[in-house]
Image (cartoon, coloured by chain):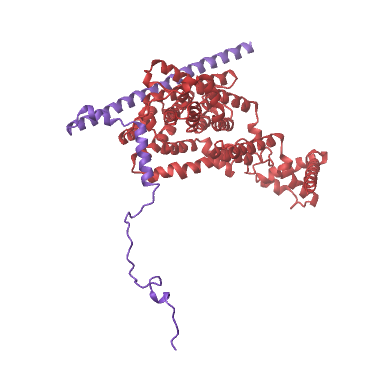
Amino acid sequence: MAMKKALTVIVIIGILAIMNAIVVQGDAAQAYETVQTEESIAKVSGDQEASNNSDGPRSYSAMEGIKKFISFTGFANATPGHLIMLLVGLFFIFLAIRYDYEPLLLIPIGTGIIIGNIPFFQAPGVNLQLGIYQEGSVLNYLYYGVTKGIYPPLIFLGIGAMTDFSSLISSPRLVILGAAAQVGIFMTLLGALVLGFNLPEAASIGIIGGADGPTAIFLSSKLANGSIVNGVQTQNLIGPIAIAAYSYMALVPVIQPPIMRLLTSKRERVMRMKPPRSVSKLEKITFPIVGLILTTFISPGALPLLGMLFFGNILKESGVTRRLADTAKASMIDIVTILLGLTVGASTQADVFITPQSILIFVLGAVSFMVATAGGILFAKVMNLFLSKENKINPLIGASGVSAVPDSARVVQNEGLKADPSNHLLMHAMAPNVSGVIGSAVAAGILLSFML
Amino acid sequence: MNILKIGLDFQGAIDEGLTIAIVGYVTVFLALVILYFVFTYIAKIYKLQIRQKLLKEGVKVDECCKEIDIPGDVVAAISTALYMTLMLHDEESKVLTIKKVSRTYSPWNSKIYSMRNLKKW
């Protein structure tokens, strides 16, 4: 039985190889394909003149028809790049299902990568309206939400509607840890400049260090979208930046723990913190209103993100718009996540994505995550030097200053439990975590105001 | 000459980047430090208001201060207790009685079923 299956597979591969040889490699076939390409260009672009000049409808022999069909299949147009990207897509899906790494993100992105890398016939001037970069295609329309920066603020609305800021309100000093961890953004900006990226591109790459996918997409859609920004021609880096940001967000449980263990002693990891006080409803309502006005006055560039974040939180905390808050934090964010994940995945079309720049972006992204984590932990240790004994903070929670909500807070909780099974740090870690979201959005706004 | 120009451009970009990085980082810090101060003082103002309100009602300040800040673990314990009481138990009528059935006749209490019904000739 197994032999039979293997034989079938070998035969199919053989047939495909022969077909490929006939259509793509043979000299005659090459010449035919050139003619076909020209005809396709005339046909697809609706060049009526070309059709009128021909002497009536052209008749194809059966072989020509088959060859034409085969030249349009994925097999004839596949490149090693496509196959690599298909494997990457499958790997993402595998990670999500097997290890439960951010399945809500990695399944749409992984499937998007597969959809975006199904090879199809492409030639200059031909627009089959299939690919994500082909104007008028369905995917292209959905991709507008990414390139015009529509999806990220909607995601922020949902995040605002589901975030409880009480841990932050009860311990405002932990807000500063969220600022400290943003060091990753600015160090990566410098790193990207050293590696030869121009300033707008470097700023977009730097924001990966904020560990915030929507913010990274928002900034790269403004600064690294292939257009001229502030007199500088930029490359379209939205795909690689988004993939790097989301991949590392999913890999937070892998990246952060070794750095946390490296930078803290066992004595520091078992440190217990004062339980947070209860927060009144009035404080909870005041926070988004004051936060919105204050942060957007300092960084108006972050208005679409912070405006929506705090708006979502007002919906939640006001207590009178429960239906709207429920929609924002459930159905709406789910719809936007599906569209965002799918289109970001599909934007990794091999010919656009597999470049040396993408590899550099991935390297810089990993470094920025590590620097951000280390920055938060070290700053927590510095803060401890000035705090009284009963107010000292567990340095582990500094790692949650990166704004991967709630993943990094969860990592802190797990690391804390490993050191002391009765020491729960989750509530404390949520404060720098949500403050990191605000911090990275403020940083994005500042970078935007510098570049535009 | 070209190498020198590229070098100078690169140096210029790095300088500009460094400026952006320093100013940007300081600004992010500034924004969140202001937020920290605002919320530290807002909490104090609210606490003061509650204290004054309690004073008007005749509650001693020292007593009320202890009551204003309920520790998080106490809140968690109360919330868990409420959750367990309200969510984990079935709502029951709490009336332990046997209701009288309006239909008095039942095969269970009918003598006729417990006796042999002999045919009368």
View extreme (bottom): residue = B121
User: Which one is nearer the viewer's eye here, A1 or B39?
Assistant: A1
Provide residue A113's location: percent of width, then percent of height: 62, 38
User: Which one is nearer the viewer's eye here, A188 or A415?
Assistant: A415
Q: Is residue B25 above or below residue A414?
A: above
Residue drawn where x is 54% and y is 31% of the image = A249
User: Which one is nearer the viewer's eye here, A195 or A379?
Assistant: A379
Q: Is residue A97 above or below residue A394?
A: below
Provide residue A26's location: percent of width, then percent of height: 82, 39
Provide residue B9's location: percent of width, then percent of height: 57, 15
Picture mark count: 0
User: Which one is nearer the viewer's eye here, B117 or A26?
Assistant: B117
Instruction: Report whether B91 appears left or right of A253.
Output: left
Which of the 4 quarters of the picture holds residue A142? top right
Which of the 4 quarters of the picture holds residue A383? top left
* Chain A pictured colour: red
Query: From where the camera sits, is residue A61 visible?
Result: no
Which of the 4 quarters of the picture holds residue A241? top right
Query: From where the camera sits, is residue A283 visible?
Result: yes
Residue drawn where x is 80% and y is 49% of the image = A63
* Chain B pictured colour: purple
Provide residue B110's location: percent of width, then percent of height: 38, 74
